[in-house]
Amino acid sequence: MISKELDRVGLPVAVVTAMYPVAEQVKASRIVKAVSIPHPCGDPTLPQELDERLRREIVETSLKALQTPVNAPARFIPEMTVAA
């Protein structure tokens, strides 16, 4: 996985994915839980205002993940979640 190579050379990476178990299996260092496979960074079924809040929360969670030192795979979950 390219994220592991980027981390290895000193560039922190946060993988945003709905398939976080796969990212954990390949030992990605920072894993941000996404909404769904076709729409990882949002939910088009939500009203626009809620979708924008959800997308912002995913991006902010990703930025926090990039600032967090890790030694093993770590999962970061956005605080705003949407029931599937």
Image (cartoon, rainbow, N blue to C red):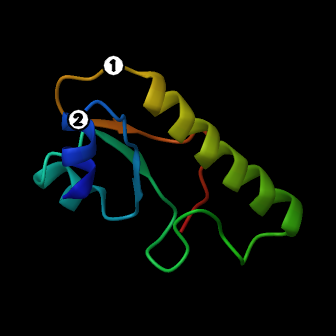
Left or right position of 79 against 11: right
Query: What residue is rendered at 19% in x and 61% in y?
Result: 22
Labels 1 and 2: the sequence-earlier one: 2
Query: What residue is rendered at 66% in x and 70% in y?
Result: 43
Instruction: Tell me the SS state at disc 2.
Output: loop
Query: What residue is rendered at 71% in x and 76% in y?
Result: 44
Q: What numbered label is drawn on residue 36?
A: none
Spatial distance from mark 1 to mark 2, Cα to Cα?
14 Å
Amino acid type of the residue tagged 2 in the rendering: Val
How busy is the neighbourhood of tag 1: few (under 14 within 10 Å), some, or many (20 plus)? Answer: few
Vertical placement of 38 versus 68: above or below? below
Return the residue nearer the eye: 77 or 29: 29
Vertical placement of 44 versus 51: above or below? below
| Residue 16, horizontal then vertical, whole percent | 43, 55
| Residue 21, horizontal then vertical, whole percent | 22, 57
Return the residue nearer the eye: 50 or 39: 39
Number of callouts: 2
How busy is the neighbourhood of tag 2: few (under 14 within 10 Å), some, or many (20 plus)? Answer: few
Point out the frontmost of discs 1 and 2: 2
Per the image, the residue denoted by label 2 is 9
Quarter of the image holding residue 74? Answer: top left
Q: Residue furthest top?
A: 69
Amino acid type of the residue tagged 1 in the rendering: Pro
Query: What residue is rendered at 52% in x and 40% in y?
Result: 62
Instruction: Tell me the SS state at disc 1.
Output: loop
Vertical placement of 44 versus 72: above or below? below
The answer, for residue 5, to whether it is visible in the render is yes
Vertical placement of 2 versus 42: above or below? above
The answer, for residue 80, to whether it is visible in the render is no
Left or right position of 20 against 54: left
Per the image, the residue denoted by label 1 is 69
